[in-house]
Amino acid sequence: MSLAFDDYGRPFIILREQGSKSRVRGTEAVKANILAAKTVARTLRSSLGPKGMDKMLQSPDGDVTITNDGATILEQMEVQHQIGKLLVELSKSQDHEIGDGTTGVVVLAGSLLEQAESLLDMGIHPLRIAEGYEMACKVATAHLDSIATKWDFSPEEVEPLVQTCMTTLSSKVVGRLKRQMAEICVKAVLAVADLPRRDVNLDLIKVEGKVGGAMEDTRLVEGIVIDKDFSHPQMPKELKDVKIAILTCPFEAPKPKTKHKVDIDTVEKFESLRHAEQQYFIDMVQKCKDAGAGLIICQWGFEDEANHLLMHHNLPAIRWVGGVEIELLAMATGARIVPRFEELSPDKLGFAKCVREVGYGTTKERSIIIEGCPNLSAVTIWVRGGNRMVLDEVRRSLHDALCVARNLVRDNSIVYGGGSAEIACSLAVEAAADKVVGVEQYAMRAFAGKVVGVEQYAMRAFADALEAVPLALAENSGLPSIESLTAVKARQLAESNPHLGIDCNDAGTNDMREQNVFETLIGKRQQMFLATQVCKMILKIDDIIQPSQYD
């Protein structure tokens, strides 16, 4: 406990239990935070790019995940250090906003903090470093806008979207099938996109899968896939041109809301009760038949009596369908969700050209595929994979590609990949730093009217930090990293060509236009904004108070 005294000599407590807390202040606190952030960033560095390595993570309950997705790795690493958790949140922010670039944003943030450490050793104040980073970020994003290219596309001409999705998928487990997967993702996004408003609701795209088969069997279903089967094994397994009723009321006899008791002391009373209950079910089935329904999809279950009557009246049914799937089915088939049998009418039925039940191998697992829906406002990507880990990684990869296609629908500006954008921005920031003059020069009044301060050191450090991405790409591809970066940077400077990057795929050219390696402008811009913001936050922390560790 820390005591102080007021003007009258009376003691008062400043910080209770001071002895049981550890405290780090000043530059030591900043460097401790930088060290934690660098450690997390180094973990992801080897996963960057098309030749990046995967990480295998085991959860406390024994589940194993194999992935090179930055957000997934950090989420399952269970980082304990508070600054490490900031980088986890950074990766999540990139994932939620853009959907891609989660590894690159953490690598960039780690590199920025690594460069800041050397500036702190020079005696530059952390706030001046943060201000310099902010100035450099503005220069870099402005340069990104100047080198960006707009790609026009239409529902008939989707090649620009496919090429950009292929760049995203090239670093994933589906890299060998990137063309097929990219086309599936683009078709799915355009099927649910509102092109006049330039908006895409990804909730309308379901990504479902079953273990078994090969990745090549992945396909786009223009409709909905339900992980259920028909309620009775003798119901038909395929229906053509069927009208669908979607119910949220159960096929059960009505039950009183209050406590009740029924005394049955004769066979006649039991028979009358059974006949009354059976009549309820017959009336329910008849109402469905009178409305013209050929398939019943119910959110709740059936009793055996109702299930038997449905099969007897040749009325196929699916039960226990989830609420989200119910809504997607209603949008796709054009049906209205009916809460009571009394409200069922022909105008509330949906339509599908084909409803079929499919099986998988020698297992008893079944799925219902509903295709040919009139309103193609909900689609399903049906994924197959050899095991659960591959299946999960394919779904994560397709999610990234879907997000990239959505981003291009919203903003069709792209920059070229392979580290070319980072190198071009690095050169632009270095050129801008030369225009920032020092205090000593300003004192000589030789540079009146220019920006004054030590921010030029921070801007040059920002430029060096941007080169961490192409360095990591070259290193992960087995190339000599420094030589590759230096050669590309020299060529960009000499030729004024911002499209030159690291040749990770050994294509024989450094021009990313020829290799068709693209990234979305908003994704790259968001990376720089988020990395700069988190670095500013970390650099402004100069006091760490935490409970001491147990002995």
Image (spheres, rainbow, N blue to C red):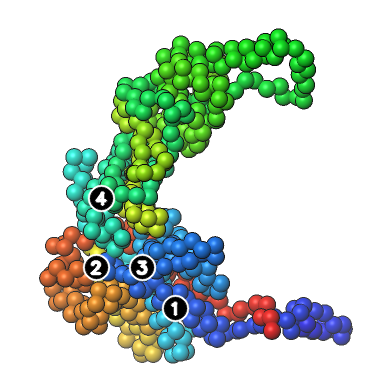
Question: What type is the residue that disc 1 sits on?
Answer: Lys
Mark 2 or mark 3, whichever is nearer to me:
3
Name above or below for residue 131 compared with residue 328: below
Query: Label 2 to label 4, Cα distance in Å?
Result: 27 Å
Identify the image quadrant of the C terminus. Answer: bottom right
Which circle's residue, 1 or 2, is located before the other in the chain? 1
Question: What type is the residue that disc 2 sits on?
Answer: Gly
In the rendering, which numbered label is found on residue 54? 3
**Label 1: which residue?**
38
Mark 4 or mark 1, whichever is nearer to me:
4
Which circle's residue, 2 or 4, is located before the other in the chain? 4
Q: Residues within 10 Å of mark 3 (few under 14, many from 20)?
A: some
Query: Label 3 to label 1, Cα distance in Å?
Result: 19 Å
The picture places residue 337, in percent across and down from the top left corner, at 49, 26
In the rendering, which numbered label is found on residue 183? none
Residue 282 visible somewhere in the drawing: yes
For the view shown, which residue lies furthest in the front direction? 267
Instruction: Choose between 442 and 311: the one closer to the eye.
Output: 311
Residue in the picture at 32% in, 83% down: 447
The picture places residue 104, in percent across and down from the top left corner, at 36, 67
**Label 4: which residue?**
216
Question: What type is the residue that disc 3 sits on?
Answer: Asp
Q: Residues within 10 Å of mark 2 (few under 14, many from 20)?
A: many
Residue 263 placement, left or right of 77 = right
Query: Label 3 to label 4, Cα distance in Å?
Result: 21 Å
**Label 2: which residue?**
418
Mark 2 or mark 4, whichever is nearer to me:
4
Question: What type is the residue that disc 4 sits on?
Answer: Glu
Marks 2,3: beta carbons within 8 A: no
Mark 3 or mark 4, whichever is nearer to me:
4
Q: Residues within 10 Å of mark 1 (few under 14, many from 20)?
A: many
Identify the image quadrant of the N terminus. Answer: bottom right
